[in-house]
Amino acid sequence: MNNFSRISEALKYIDGHLDETITLEGLAEKFFLSPFYFHKLFSMVVGKSLAAYIRDRRVLSACRQLCDTKKTILDIALDCGFRSPAAFSRTFCQVQGMSPSEYRAQGCRPVIVTAGELIMKFTNRLRGGILLNPNIIKRGKMIIAGTCGDGDKTEEVWSAFGKLSGEKPLGNALSGDGYEIRVFADRKFPFDSAPTKKRKKSK
């Protein structure tokens, strides 16, 4: 078994044992590598530490159970390897940005990529591909504020927007990210013309 295969098998093992205590030392011994080398190889292939990966997979498993079952949050926490509801809620909020009960109330269904699919993505990345791992979050209504312009003059529109948002910044922006929104087929959408930091609408 080569080293990449060991990481592949480790990912499958983790998914099958999320309700158990999983340690670096235990995994390294199981796959015949030193803890130091196993963690270095795992982080290189997966793109995050072993602890962060296990945390994220446990939260994803919890998301699925919150949507698909009527289990209590305590039972879900224990099923996913958390030692207490408090630890579960704290970790869940860190990863998902909301509490388990809020997530359940929204009725969101998580997209869970299997260990095999993850390995395929990691393989493509190592071969020079691009790994995309979007985190889709449902939001309520929001106002998109910015400037409009010709889609063929993106640079000019961004420059105008940068100047405008610097002069009249809004204090209630959801984030500092910038987006370009393109509207096709002469469809018209209402929007607030007041700028917010790095927000732009273009058509």
Image (tube, rainbow, N blue to C red):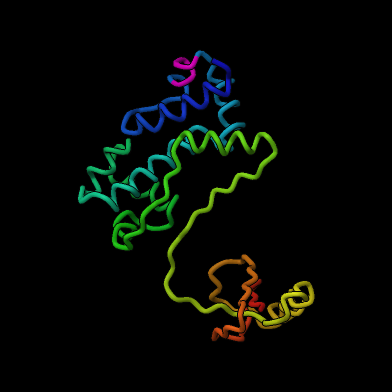
Indicate the position of residue 105 as horizontal and vertical percent values.
Answer: 29, 62
Residue beneath the point at 31% across and 33% down: 19
Q: Inspect the magenta stretch and tell me whether residue 171 lies in it.
A: no
* Residue 130: quadrant of the picture: top right
50 sits left or right of 81 in the view: right
Question: What residue occupies the far front of the structure in this picture?
Answer: 185
Indicate the position of residue 36 as horizontal and vertical percent values.
Answer: 57, 21
146 sits left or right of 7 in the view: right
* Residue nearest the observer in this picture, 44 or 4: 4
Indicate the position of residue 35 as horizontal and vertical percent values.
Answer: 53, 19
* Residue nearest the observer in this picture, 30 or 117: 117
* Residue nearest the observer in this picture, 155 or 73: 155
Residue beneath the point at 70% across and 38% down: 128
65 sits left or right of 25 in the view: left
Q: Inspect the magenta stretch and tell me whether residue 28 lies in it.
A: yes
87 sits left or right of 70 in the view: right
Range shown magenta: 27-31
